[in-house]
């Protein structure tokens, strides 16, 4: 390994260490147990230098969100730290609170550290701040524009007090925010140590080399795909309608160009995806299909160009609601990118295609509680292998919430947690199976679900069968069964049971 590679790997490990500190310091199970957070390091222009292997939808958006934030906030001094969650700047959705801090070395600005963490509740009318009925971001939660949460090394108590008064579980939210601050401070200290050890100019030179190397390696790999154009579409389930996401992908010696011309206009609902999410989903697919260990930095991202027309589902105008765009539309963008590329190269069949978002909350023992989790499914079969069962698929890289943790902190009791046998698509290579996860509530609770793939099943390829679509059933305490749609909010009474069945992946080749 050459000296520049050693330095580059060290910066990747610094990003990983930031994530470890964030996870271990966090208050919420969503971050501490599910690891719904991401960390990265950039240069002075916001170009990604290194990132940890965290959440795909966060990581790709850093390339957009950091630059957008720098354009808004202006110059940052040593000891400053910016907090924001405005999705039209940070690039995902309101729950993802982003913290950005400058790195100064010998009084000179050399770069930035950044992290995002999914806060379980950022205000708004419904638990967990993912509102299936939202038509604007103002019906989803509290919007934080870029503002300094730290000024010259001191906490800005005014910002903290505003967050306390608007997030519904403030003691948890402030705990998670402190974990994010600590992660960035740790990253800054580690990076300064690297400059001490290897020298200012040498480190900056290494950054340039690693970005150039990544770009050259990506172009070399995609040249093996051959030049070509692939075009296809996939669908979102909006009430009784299907909304189309259409994509044309062009691959040539200059890189990859993804054009979403023909995609339906933005909707009055929460499934619009801001540009950062769209770019992130396309980038994830390309990164997944590359066969080598490639530094995932600005060199990689620079090879991908995405045209997402303004005013569409994949690049809405503010203040369109976007909470579900981050968690559901991102999955569909990934699916349609795989599908379009299937006309050029071999790709897997569709995975479960939903994060199956579960949001709950109420008053318990005199205090408000909010619970959020996503539930995995099956991956699509591959050209030479079966899919994988019961995993988080594509744009999420989180863990599950352990049942013991959920039951300890919240008034819920789980009744089932198992693989949904036979839900993967049939074929020579079978799609992975989904999950059945069921629970009862122990007191009156507000439940919301935001999901997809209830009507349009995950597709198979080359004659392989589709995976089974999702289902959510509520069994009321009096025995009544209610088959629920993919997006809803309802009141559960003590003893009501919720049975969630996630989709399996598509199959590959006919039997």
Image (cartoon, rainbow, N blue to C red):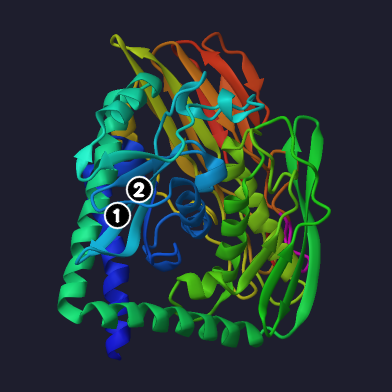
Q: Which mark is residue 155?
A: none
Using the image as rendered, state which of residue 2 and residue 368 is in the foreground: 2
Mark toward the viewer: 1 or 2: 1
Q: CA distance from mark 1 to mark 2?
A: 9 Å
Q: Secondary structure at mark 1?
A: helix
Q: Quadrant of the C terminus?
A: bottom right
Task: Evaluate if marks 1 and 2 touch, with contact meaning CB atoms under 8 Å apart.
Answer: yes
Magenta segment, which residues?
A: 459-465
Residue farthest toward the right in the current orientation of the protein:
262
**Which image quadrant is residue 220 in?**
bottom right
Using the image as rendered, state which of residue 194 and residue 102 is in the foreground: 102
Name above or below for residue 359 compared with residue 216. Answer: above
What crowding class fits label 1: few (fewer than 14 Cα within 10 Å), some (14-19), or many (20 or more)? many
What crowding class fits label 2: few (fewer than 14 Cα within 10 Å), some (14-19), or many (20 or more)? many
Q: Which residue is mark 1?
A: 19
Q: Where is residue 388 drawn, in percent x and y?
A: 52, 60
Using the image as rendered, state which of residue 103 and residue 370 is in the foreground: 103
**Magenta highlight: main SS:** loop
Q: Where is residue 182 drawn, in percent x and y?
A: 22, 47
Name above or below for residue 450 compared with residue 125. Answer: below
Q: Which mark is residue 35?
A: 2
User: Would residue 262 be found to the left or right of residue 146 on screen?
Assistant: right
Q: Is residue 279 visible?
A: yes
Q: Residue at x 25, y 61 (%)?
A: 104
Decide which of tag 1 and tag 2 comes sooner along the chain.
1
Q: Secondary structure at mark 2?
A: loop
Q: Where is residue 138 drawn, in percent x and y?
A: 57, 25
């Amino acid at each position: 390994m050459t000296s520049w590679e050693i330095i580059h790997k060290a910066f990747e490990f610094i990003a990983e260490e930031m994530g470890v500190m964030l996870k271990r310091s966090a208050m919420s199970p969503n971050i501490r147990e599910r690891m719904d957070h991401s960390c990265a390091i950039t240069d002075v222009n916001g170009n990604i230098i290194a990132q940890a292997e965290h959440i795909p939808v966060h990581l790709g958006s850093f390339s957009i969100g950091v630059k957008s934030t720098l354009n808004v906030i202006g110059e940052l001094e040593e000891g400053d730290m910016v907090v924001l969650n405005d999705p039209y700047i940070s690039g995902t959705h309101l729950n993802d609170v982003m913290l950005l801090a400058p790195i100064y070395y010998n009084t000179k600005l050399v770069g930035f550290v950044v992290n995002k963490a999914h806060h379980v509740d950022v205000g708004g009318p419904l638990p967990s701040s993912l509102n299936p009925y939202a038509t604007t971001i103002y019906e989803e939660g509290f919007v934080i524009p870029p503002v300094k949460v730290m000024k010259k090394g001191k906490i800005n108590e005014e910002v903290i007090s505003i967050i306390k008064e608007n997030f519904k579980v403030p003691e948890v939210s402030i705990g998670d925010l402190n974990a994010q601050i600590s992660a960035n401070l740790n990253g800054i200290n580690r990076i300064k140590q690297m400059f001490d050890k290897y020298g200012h100019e040498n480190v900056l030179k290494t950054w340039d080399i690693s970005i150039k190397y990544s770009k050259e390696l990506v172009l070399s790999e995609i040249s093996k795909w051959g030049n070509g154009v692939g075009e296809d579409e996939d669908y979102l389930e909006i009430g009784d309608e299907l909304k189309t996401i259409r994509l044309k992908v062009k691959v040539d010696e200059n890189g990859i160009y993804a054009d979403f011309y023909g995609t339906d206009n933005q909707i009055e609902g929460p499934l619009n995806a801001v540009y950062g999410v769209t770019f992130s989903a396309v980038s994830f697919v390309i990164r997944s299909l590359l066969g080598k260990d490639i530094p995932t930095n600005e060199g990689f991202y620079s090879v991908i160009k995405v045209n997402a027309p303004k005013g569409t589902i994949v690049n809405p105008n503010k203040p369109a609601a976007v909470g579900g765009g981050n968690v559901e539309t991102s999955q569909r963008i990934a699916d349609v990118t795989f599908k379009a590329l299937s006309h050029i190269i071999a790709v897997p069949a569709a995975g479960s295609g939903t994060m199956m978002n579960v949001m709950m909350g109420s008053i318990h023992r005199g205090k408000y509680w909010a619970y959020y989790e996503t539930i995995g499914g099956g991956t699509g079969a591959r050209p030479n292998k079966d899919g994988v069962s019961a995993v988080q698929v594509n744009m999420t890289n989180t863990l599950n919430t352990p049942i013991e943790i959920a039951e300890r902190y919240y008034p819920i009791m789980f009744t089932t947690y198992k693989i949904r046998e036979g839900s993967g698509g049939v074929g020579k290579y079978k799609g992975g199976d989904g999950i059945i996860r069921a629970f009862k509530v122990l007191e009156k609770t507000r439940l919301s679900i935001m999901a997809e793939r209830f009507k349009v099943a995950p597709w198979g390829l080359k004659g392989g069968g589709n995976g089974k679509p999702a289902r959510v059933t509520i069994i009321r305490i009096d025995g009544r069964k209610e088959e629920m749609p993919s997006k809803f909010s309802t009141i559960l009474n003590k003893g009501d049971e919720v049975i969630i069945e996630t989709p399996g992946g598509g199959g590959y080749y006919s039997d």
